[in-house]
Image (cartoon, grey):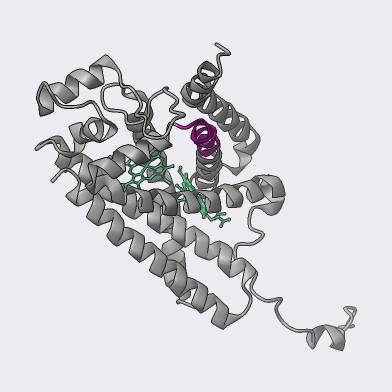
Amino acid sequence: MASSKSNAVNWFLHRITGTFLVFMLITHFWVQHYDHSVASVTTDVVAQEGELPTYSDEAAAGVKAKFGADAEVTPYNVVMQRLADPVYAVLWKGFNILFLIVALHHGFYGLNNVLTDYIRNPLGRVMARVLSWSVALVLLIIGLYSVITAGW
Amino acid sequence: MAVETAERPAAQATQPSAVEDSGRFQRYRIRTGMFAWMMHRLTGVGLVVYLIIHVWGLKSLTDPTAFNALIAKYHAPIYKVGEFGLLVAVVYHAMNGLRIVLIDFLGWSPKQKKLFVVLGIVALVLIAVGGYPSIYSLLAHYGAV
Ligand code: HEM
Ligand code: HEM
């Protein structure tokens, strides 16, 4: 096990990351669902393979203004209003990266607490810890890569 | 001075000194109820699972066709149900987590009951307002509204 000091620091950090996540998740849900000019998820239900959701007039106008009058109003282009913009992209990519790091730390530290409660065997605990943080690291790399290169 | 206290029974002294460190297992159990704690743990692990799937899926951010397919899939009826479930899990975990933080950091334990009620109401409002689009789109899809 790690020293008790680092556990105390992590315990503290877990509460801080949790508090941060409240604000980040509110922003995230707002952007993905409620801001009708940039939200990628609409109230449309798509039941057929290959069909795309329809977007609001604001979203359509935004996409055309940014990518040209003949740009299609697809989910990708709607999201790229934020992620392919020279100014907003830095802001949103920065936000997403911070969100990614905070969510991964909080989630996987929490997961380790749970695993430690159910796994009694010290070797098992070490293995669970190594395994779960490896998954977190892979997700961090994948997430960083996709959000940074999106829209390039 | 007469010794009136009984000597410590030998048996007690030789008992194994500590039950194995039970970690955080029981920290909030008595104070705020087993159920609140179990749900917090359940939603927490659920959110981790969602996060793994989510970040994995978002690899498609680099490929317009794949991303369109992903977001289109998010609009399928079953995903609307899932979206609502996700919102409920997030709101529950967030409000209960906030409750724990306020009790731990600001020492709000004397105000526990009130805190519980207030955050419970906030949670219900967030679920109602936030869940409205998902539920509405489902009802509209099946012609109920
Ligand atoms: C929305 C804001 C959030 C807040 C305020 C919050 C708060 C908390 C707090 C205070 C704890 C510690 C509970 C304890 O020590 O008993 C906790 C545990 C946990 N959280 Fe969060 N959290 C949030 C979001 C998330 C997210 C997004 C995830 C998943 C990615 C997550 C996963 C977990 C896990 C797995 C645990 C461990 C559960 C346990 O030990 O029983 N949380 N959360
Ligand atoms: C149904 C609800 C959700 C939808 C539709 C959604 C959609 C998206 C989309 C489209 C992105 C791409 C980046 C962007 O648009 O700025 C994204 C990024 C992200 N989402 Fe969500 N999300 C949802 C819920 C959540 C939840 C509950 C969490 C936390 C557990 C989360 C964590 C993240 C993170 C960390 C990123 C950044 C990923 C990266 O940097 O690669 N999302 N989300």
- Residue at point 23% right, 46% down? B63
Q: Is residue A112 above or below residue A101?
A: below
- Residue at point 26% right, 27% down? A38
The percent position of residue A140, horizontal first and vertical second, equals 31, 59
The percent position of residue B145, horizontal first and vertical second, equals 55, 11
Q: Residue furthest top?
A: B145
Foreground: B121 or B18? B121
The percent position of residue B87, horizontal first and vertical second, equals 50, 35
The secondary structure that dominates the magenta segment is helix
Judge left or right: residue B71 versus residue B2.
Answer: left
| Residue B33 in sight | no
Judge left or right: residue A66 versus residue A52.
Answer: left
Instruction: Tell me, yes or no, whether the highlighted magenta stretch contains residue A64.
Output: no
- Residue at point 11% right, 21% down? A69
Magenta region:
B76-87
- Residue at point 54% right, 50% down? B46
Foreground: B106 or B87? B87
